[in-house]
Every structure is written in structure tokens, then in C-alpha cells.
Amino acid sequence: MSLIASLNTGAGGLAVNQKGIEVTGNNVANINTEGYSRQSLVVSSSPTLEFQGQMIGTGAVASSVSRATNNFLAKQLTDKKSGYGEENSKGIILAEVEQIVGISTSDFSTDLDEFFDSWQELSDNPSATLERQQVMQKGAEVADSLQSMVSDLNAVSESINDDISGKVTSLNQQLNKVADLNVQILASESTGISANGLRDQRDMLLQDISETAGVTYYEEANGMVSIQLQNGQPLVTADQVSNVAAEWTNGTLQVSVDGGVSTSILDADDFGGELGGMLEMRDEYIPDLIEKLDILAYNIATSVNAVHTGGVDLDGNAGVDFFSFSAGGSDPWTGAASSIAMALTDTAQVAAGTTAAPDNQPGDNENTLNMVALQDQAVINGNNTLNDYYAVIASDVGLTVSQNEAMSDSIGDSLDQIQNMRDSVAGVSTDEEMLMLIQYQSGYEAAARYLTTVDEMLDTLMSM
């Protein structure tokens, strides 16, 4: 091999080590970049040449820049992101629900206790106007509290609708970005140029999409990824995107996906992530909670009315309904909590006794005592008093909140653990990069000294 060929070998060594320094510097610069995967220079030997019957090496070349990754951990991260997003979205909503239907010093059970306490006070002076006003006022507060809880829960649902619309818009932007990255990655890698940075961006997007919608994905042989919902509905196939829509239909914000041939309506079972949690809370949890309040309101109204109509008012007339409500649907209680209201318009209508009082006499208090006794009667399903039934509702909300917090903490811990494992595989270590930098620096210096030696030999040869 000639001295000129030796110069090429030395130059190749310089180039390889210089490239190594560049790759190492890029790693160090991105040490705090979220989602960045450590890159490594892949060095291979140059083809050997035959010289006077000997196979002589011709140096080394930088063949590619590899990207540290672990597909299993990447899948685990996206899966955990889905669960984390779902529980986190539920937690935010449940915190609001707990404020509305929760056990506190001023909850609905207090209103109910004060309502029955007002009847107890009326029993001491059944014809007194002030005590009668108190009964009507406390009854109105019971009705107002039930209406307010349903109104507030409906407001939470409306807020969820706003959040769903925003998440769907963001999701579509992310899906289109993945499709764009698919095209860029294919174009780059088909020409032999690494697309490590583009792949990092796509991995981060896949995690974000999973946190939003709980998707699954797989990578094609050409490097493109396809994304599907939990039900198998495709969202991204190569560079094609099926956009998700959130549109109002018959008073309901409906989520759907355009599959090209037809449009599919989606619900909580089709999603994971934040959208799955939001849809479950809006379509299942909150309606179920409102139905329980309807059952409570219906039983309060019907049981109080049954006692009240069994008595007589201050004028000796038969008692009328104490509460009014309107309900419709397959169940008689549907809509009761949102419509219950005080039906009496005058204190004289309060039916405190069971018999008409003689002129200028206060009358009996038998019906007030019957009403007080109602508080301890198991009027709901033969198992619960009115207070007990509300306590069960509030306790169930508290239990759901606690379960959500425990699940969020558990998934969060798992997510941190998997992230740490991913970082140990693909993250940048300052110590390792400094060692690599020293290694490449030494290699560069050695190649430079080699070139200097060959150059001196050439000078000697030329001077002969």
C-alpha cells in the first residue's frame, strides 16, 4: 500500500473521530431534552485491499448513527400513559362532584335534619305562625338543595363537554403530525439517512396521543406507524388520518370518527386515556348519581306528602301535597330532584294536626309527630331512611374519590419506574459521554500523529 493510500487511511481516522465527537456533543446538548434518545456512532472497517499478496486494511468509516431504544419499554410507556390520563381526568371531575355531593358540616343531610327539627318545634305550638313559616322555609331549602345538586352536576357535564371538544381538536392535530412524521421518516431512511430525531418526536407524540385517547399502535416494516383505538378503529395508517369529530346531535355532544366509508359513533368503551375517563364520567357516572338523587327526591316528596295529606291544616281542611315535582320516563322518579319544590303558599296550609281544632283553640299536634317519626322510618326500598340513603350516596362518592386517588398514585409510580428504566437504556449519562469524548479525542490525536508521520515519510521520500 502506498504512502498516499496511508494518508487516506489517516484522514478517515480523523473523520471518524471527529464525527464521534459531534455525536457525543449532540448527546450532551440534549441531556435535558424530554424524549431524547441517546445516539451512538456506528463505525465499521473500510474494505481491505490486496497488496503484493497481502490483505491490507484501509481504515475505518462512520457507517451510521444508531438510536438507543427499547420497543417493549416504549409500548409500556404508552400503555401507562393511557391509564394515567384516564384516572387523572376522572380525578379532576370527581373533585368537583365531591364538592357537590359530599359529607360535610353543611351538606344535604343537615338540611334534612333541620327540616324534621322544624316539625319537632312546631309540635310544641302547632298553631304558631313563626314555627309554620320555619317548616315551609326548611322544606324549601331541602327542595332547593336537591335542585342545586342536580344543576351543579349538569354544569360539570357541560364543562366536560368543553374539555372533550378541546381534547378532540388537540388529538386531530397530533394524529396529523404523526402522519407527517411517518412520511418524513420513510423519506429519510429510504435514502440511508438516520431519522433519529424524527423518531424521538413521534414517540413523544404517541405517548401524548395515548394519554389523550388510549390508543394502540404498531410499526410497519417501512418504519411508518399505524394507530388504532381500543376498538380497533384505525386513526392513522401510513400517511392517512381518520379525524375524530365532536359535534352536537340532539342536545348531546357526540364523538365520532370518519372511517371513509361510514362514520362510527364512539363512547367510553372505545377510548382510554383522558377522553375515556371524561366520557365515562359524563355518560355513566354522573347520570347514575343524578338518578340516585332523583330516587331520594321522589321518596322525600311522596313520603312527606303521604303524611301531610293525612292531616288537617289550620283551617280544618284536609292537608294537600307539601312538595310538588314533575317526573317523566320509564321510572316514576326520573327528574324528581331537578323539579322538586315547596307546594304550599300559606302557613295556614301546614297540616300540623289530624283533627280540626275548635274555635280559638290551637288544635292537636299529631301530624307533626307523625312527620317527625318519618325521619327514622326506612322508606326507601324498605332498607334506608332518607338520611341513610343520602349518606350512602355521599359515601359512595367519597369511596370513588379514594379509589381514584389510589389508582392514580399506583399508575403514577409504575409510570415513573418504566420511565426510569427507559432512561437507563436510552437516556444520556454525562459520565458515559465524557468517557466517549475522551476516547474520540484520543483517537483523533492518534490519527493526527499518524498523518504527521506519513507526511514526514513523504517529505523524506521526495527529498531523495
Image (cartoon, rainbow, N blue to C red):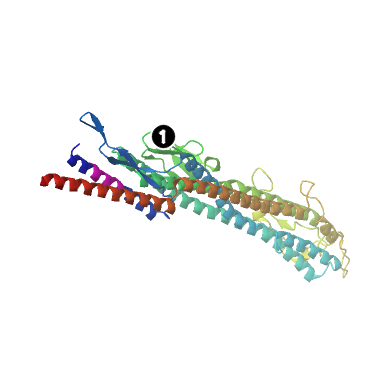
In the image, residue 82 lies at what x, y percent? Answer: 52, 45
Q: Name above or below for residue 445 compared with residue 362.
A: above
Q: Residue at x 74, y 62 (%)?
A: 110
- Report the span colored magenta: 9-18
Dot 1: what SS?
loop
Seen from the viewer's position, the closer of residues 209 and 14 is 14
Q: Position of residue 185 (x, y in %)?
A: 34, 41
Q: Residue 48: percent from the left, percent from the top? A: 26, 33
Asked whether 251 or 205 is in front, the reply is 205
Q: Residues within 10 Å of mark 1 (few under 14, many from 20)?
A: few
> Considering depth in this image, is 115 or 314 the residue closer to the camera?
115
Q: How many marks?
A: 1
Q: Position of residue 293 (x, y in %)?
A: 68, 52
Q: Is residue 12 magenta?
A: yes
In the foreground, 434 or 163: 434
The residue carrying mark 1 is: 261
Question: Which is the main secondary structure of the residues drawn in magenta?
Answer: helix
- Residue at 55% over, 40% down: 269
Q: Is residue 384 above or below residue 319?
A: above
Q: Amino acid at mark 1?
A: Val
Q: What is the quadrant of the N terminus in the image?
A: top left
Residue 85 located within the stretch drawn in magenta: no
> From where the camera sits, is residue 248 visible?
no
The extreme top residue here reads 53
Asked where in the image residue 139 lies, by quadrant, the reply is bottom right
**Which quadrant holds the C terminus?**
top left
Residue 234 seen in the current view: yes
Q: Is residue 226 left or right of residue 293?
A: left
Q: In the image, 406: left or right of 31? A: right
